[in-house]
Amino acid sequence: LTYPSVVAAVRDERWTEHVQSVLGRAGHRRGGAREAVVELLASQECALTVLEMEAALRRRRRRIGRASVYRVLELLADYGLVARIDLGDGVTRYEPSRPDGEHHHHLLCARCQRLVPFSDTALERAIAGLSARQGFNVREHEVVLHGACERCAEV
Amino acid sequence: LTYPSVVAAVRDERWTEHVQSVLGRAGHRRGGAREAVVELLASQECALTVLEMEAALRRRRRRIGRASVYRVLELLADYGLVARIDLGDGVTRYEPSRPDGEHHHHLLCARCQRLVPFSDTALERAIAGLSARQGFNVREHEVVLHGACERCAEV
DNA sequence: TTGGGTGCAAACTCTTTGCATGCCC
DNA sequence: GGGCATGCAAAGAGTTTGCACCCAA
């Protein structure tokens, strides 16, 4: 028997520690803005836009300059600690990138606008296979589906 | 024996006709800007940004307002005649969308910046399979690989 | 003649940069 | 105390909108 939310909480705590550890060893100082953004990302289920982060931080009574949010995210991305997700709507989303390589992809529901994460081993194998066949050396990959989520598809 | 360039030329001519036919039946008038953009897209191998289109059109001695290019592309996208490609660099790319559903995906080479198209039936099958398993009704999908192309991977 | 198509310029949104201030180490 | 971290404001880049003019039907 597993308790997904507990597992997720532990995993996210691990991610926060991982971030602090990586940045600390690289010689970066700590600061309020960065801590707040990292903490927020760790508590999130899926990808967030900068605007959504600002709103969430304001709700938590943390007013942080927009530029600082962007700078924190740039730094985290440079160290591979967050993944940039681009769904094609002109806004960049960010989500924690786990050191174990665990990752998922996204369906953007055209009807309810929900962002639905999913992962699939067959898909990962297919990407690995075709990369080998084509001679690519793929470091990252991103799959975005557009259509109806399982709730909206029933109708 | 096939002659890929000849095959491509015929296919692109078909796409141009297809576009004119779809738009004509929908009651859209013709205009210089639209014809020029459609012709340019048909002659292209892979996805183009609006800036690249402007430069190419200028080279062909066609000065076209930037807003017109965007409006033409929006119209074509509304009818499913072009696909919007988002590689995560903040710029939208566009390429012809064939009526037969033939399509490809892209690798963006991190070293030489080349945009390399590829297609893979196993990948398509994997996406179809996982969509069915998850209960999604997928209308479009996009796969973007980041890494080294076959030329740069050799080194 | 009529209304969609086009060009130009301004507006808008998201993101980045410059600079003065603050605070961690 | 030194220098990275932060906040604010302005600049940039890509895209959209408003409006007058043009032209296909």
Image: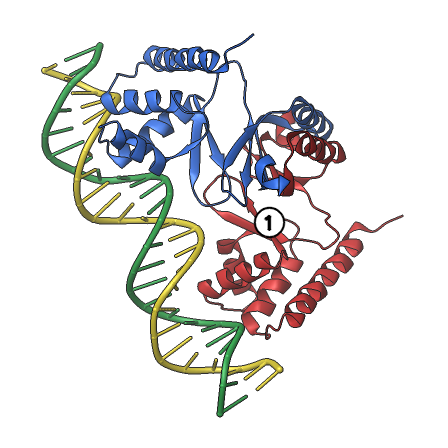
Chain colours: A red, B blue, C yellow, D green
Name the spot of residue B11 as percent of width and height, x first.
45, 13
B86 to the left or right of B70: right
Name the spot of residue D6 as percent of width and height, x first.
49, 72
B115 to the left or right of B143: left
Q: How many marks?
A: 1
Name the spot of residue A147 as percent of width and height, x first.
57, 29
Tell me the quarter of the picture where residue A108 sits. Answer: top right
Q: Is residue A7 above or below residue A142?
A: below
Which amino acid type corresponds to the residue marked 1 in the rendered image?
Ala
Name the spot of residue B48 as percent of width and height, x first.
41, 32
- Identity of the residue drawn at 75% across and 31% down: A122
Tag 1 residue: A47
Q: Residue furthest right?
A: A1
- Give the structural element (helix, strand or loop) at label 1: loop
Q: Quadrant of the C terminus of chain A?
A: top right
- Identity of the residue drawn at 56% across and 73% down: A32
